[in-house]
Amino acid sequence: MSDLEPTIAPPPLFQDADETIRAIHHGHVDAVVVITDQESPEIILLQGADKPYRVLVEHMSDGALTCGTDGTILYVNGRVSELTGHPADDLVGRRIATLFEGNGPPLNADASMEATLLRADTTSVPVKVWTRAISIDDSNVTTLVTLTDLSMHRRAEQIAAAERFARSVLEQATEAIVVLSPGGHITHASALAEELAEQPPVGCTFSKAFPLEAQSADQAGTLARFSAESLDRLLAAKPFHGVEVKLRGERLSNRSFLLSAGPLYDDNKACVGSIVTLTDITERKHAEEQQAMLVAELNHRVKNILAIVRSVASQTAGSSSSLDGFTAAFSGRLKAVALAHDILTETRWIGTGLKDLLSAVLSPYHSVDSRRVTIDGPAILLPADALLPLSMAFHELATNAAKYGALSSEDGRIDITWRLAGAGQTVELVWLERDGPKVELGSSSGFGTRLIDRVIAYDLDGGSEFDFDPLGLRCTLRFRVRADPASDVKSAIP
């Protein structure tokens, strides 16, 4: 049969069928042995060429059909009917090209190709097509066509591609991600998950690779309901979201994670495992704690401010002889509170220099001649908690000077000096007024004096002294602060 050698090697089954059919046709075979699912093979005696040909081809696992030279289907085996969904009687007599998407396989030639076989239900099947021209005798030439279903092969290719894609996703993931089998064993793990695990995670149960403990007492009850085994089964089959956990061990004890799980389903909606994530929420937890602390601090400061405003309002009202007098005094003291908070906001509650605070408080009162108010002392950084009491104290002194003291006359002046005492931790500040109106006896009984005494004593753990010298007020304030390493400052309010 050298003249019939194919130009493209067909599959072994195709070649065996070809040679067997030729042998049967020429009378060289007496019987056909058919291997079936029965205990013993079926032996079919030959009673002519047609019967053994059909028996052999009908039992092929691939589809087989023959065509005339014009493409008319002469015969199909049962497998072709299964693949197309058409009865054999409906296929015989049709043109083979109508079974395929496109032009169909070539006829009267040896060839192989992949094609799409059309089904009766309008679906399609990918197939491998082999064709071979067979000369039965000098006058009869047919084309033998075999069809191999590639559905499983394509499905395997799709699964392999999906597996490669899933692996690439895991490798690039920025979170710890693992895939669990239905039994709770890890089958895949992202790079970060491998870093977090106590041991190589693949093959381990989740609880063994990632020993967990609750982030807080509120979350502890959720984990306490499960043993390690039951937690593994739960994560492998049920949705599980929003539990904050820590990983046991010193290496990761300071990190916080959010544990979540979601089941995976196959085409039949059966659970085949799950994806479990451990999202690092350490930075978020720190931000939440910082926010909670800031809110608590804000609440505390607001309450303090309201208490101060209420106290100032009450005591100002008690010392005022008229509504206008109350309004002016109360408004000025609220401005002192607002000034202190403006400075705190600008400095992000770090504090400010003593000179800067004095300059801000005294700026509404100084004249064009800056020599009327001078400031002389070492650089001092006032802590945030000292700004409000000192702002109110300096406001009372400045208001008194503008109404009754040195700033109420054209020639009056104020000298403000301070020094560090007590190993540099205590400030002694002297407010000295000169060349203003004569100080009258009984000036020490005002509300402003009592306010200064109170805020310096109670808020700054210090003390105040007032000397109502007829030549001008001398006020000495003592309070504890830390020194700024900057050089000494001697300046006047610009």
Image (cartoon, grey):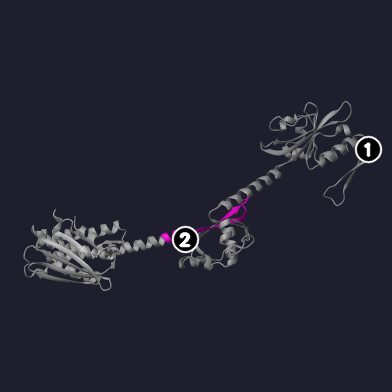
Q: Which residue is mark 1?
A: 28
**The stretch drawn in magenta includes residue 267:** yes
Q: Where, by quadrant of the figure, is residue 413 drawn? A: bottom left
Position in image of residue 465 (x %, y %): 16, 72
Q: Which label sits on residue 482?
A: none
Q: How many marks?
A: 2
Say which label, 1 or 2, has the lower sequence index: 1
Position in image of residue 288 (x %, y %): 41, 60
Q: Is residue 267 visible?
A: no
Tell us which disc is closer to us: 1 or 2. 2
Q: Which residue is mark 2?
A: 282
In this rendering, the answer to whether 264 lies above or below 18 is below
Position in image of residue 482 (x %, y %): 29, 68
- Most extreme residue toward the bottom is 422
| Quadrant including the N terminus | top right
**The stretch drawn in magenta includes residue 150:** no
Q: Is residue 56 visible?
A: yes
Label 2 sits on a secondary structure element that is helix
Distance from the alpha carbon under mark 1 to that under mark 2: 83 Å
Residue at 13% over, 59% down? 372
Q: Where, by quadrant of the figure, is residue 300 drawn? A: bottom left
Name the amino acid, label 1. His
| Quadrant including the C terminus | bottom left
- Report if the CB atoms under discs 1 and 2 are less than 8 Å apart: no
Q: Nearer the viewer, residue 89 or 471?
A: 471
Magenta residues, start to end: 262-287
Name the amino acid, label 2. Thr
Position in image of residue 307 (x %, y %): 24, 65
